[in-house]
Image: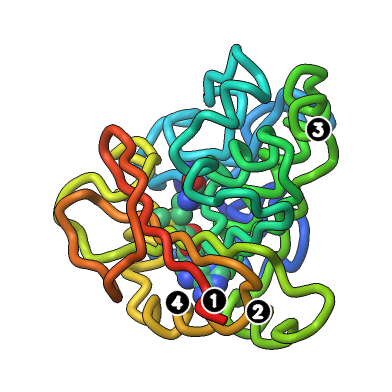
Amino acid sequence: MSGSAGHSEDERAGGAGGDSARVLGELPAGFLLARVGEDGDPASFLELRRATDREGRGIRCDLSTIRLRGGASEARGMPVVRALGEARTVVDATAGLLGDAFLIAAAGREVTAIERSPVVYELAKDGLSRAMRDPFLSELLGGRLQLVHADARAWLSARAGTSSAPDAVLMDPMFPPKKKASALPRKEMLMLRELVGADLDAAELFEQAGVTSRGRVVLKRADDTHELAAPDWTVKGTTVRFDVFTKKM
Ligand SMILES: C[S@@+](CC[C@H](N)C(=O)[O-])C[C@H]1O[C@@H](n2cnc3c(N)ncnc32)[C@H](O)[C@@H]1O
């Protein structure tokens, strides 16, 4: 097992894979990224937790916690999917722990999920690889979810006007807190916020999404926050809303 307070730098990166120095460089003081479970055990997982927290009490990407017993048809009824309309190819420009990307792929769309934080990317990659080993989840995903480590502004800019431009772009940036602004549970939101901070460049991402998307941009917001721009319409969820911006040709 890896990971409890007072570890060496290498242990703190425990099982992160990829470039440990890069990942560790982003960890705030007092946090560690550690694998819980025996190396090689398919049930082991990567978690981010405070050094003072007990093992297993941190945040991880666990797609099995997204209850989707109704499978693809239930996913198709989700507000995030309805907001995307007929889009066949979708870029989730703020992947986080893949909650939205999972629903969209389960609904049958091709999803490229982009995450720029090295730590969040490692957590998401670990969760996705476990999901791929789970028969129910991997069948739901159908190989339609691709995770990319990049800044979505640059990634989208490089594809503007090309055949790789997506039909739609979803954004769920970390706005400064007001009410619950994301589908992630509160503890996860707080830790993620501490790790990546507020996404103060969300307006730039929104502009680039509008340039590159062929059809629409969907912006996920808490229902008490202001828009970056006035949407064409809104799909309401229970605690969040999805503002839809269609491309004017
Ligand atoms: C609120 S979380 C997204 C949660 C996600 N919708 C989910 O269901 O798990 C926002 C994430 O977007 C990432 N992010 C923000 N701006 C980005 C950008 N320009 N490119 C890539 N990732 C970005 C942040 O690092 C953070 O992990």
Calculate the distance from the C-alpha at mark 2 to the C-alpha at mark 4. 11 Å
Q: Earlier in the sequence, mark 2 or mark 3?
A: 3
x and y percent of residue 12 in the render?
A: 58, 53
**Residue 227 drawn above or below residue 69:** below
Asked if the residue under mark 1 is in contact with the one under mark 4, i.e. CB atoms within 8 Å, the reply is: yes
Instruction: Answer whether labels 2 and 1 touch (C-beta < 8 Å).
Output: yes
The image's mark for residue 156 is 2
User: Along the polypeptide, which appears first: circle 2 or circle 1?
Assistant: 2
Q: Is residue 41 visible?
A: no
The residue type indicated by label 4 comes to Phe
From the viewer's side, name the closer residue of 46 and 100: 100
Residue 214 in sight from this viewpoint: yes
Q: Which residue is mark 4?
A: 206
Q: Of label 4 and label 3, which has the lower sequence position?
A: 3
Q: Which numbered marker is on residue 209?
A: 1
Residue at (39% x, 40% y) in the render: 184
Indicate the amino acid at tag 2: Leu
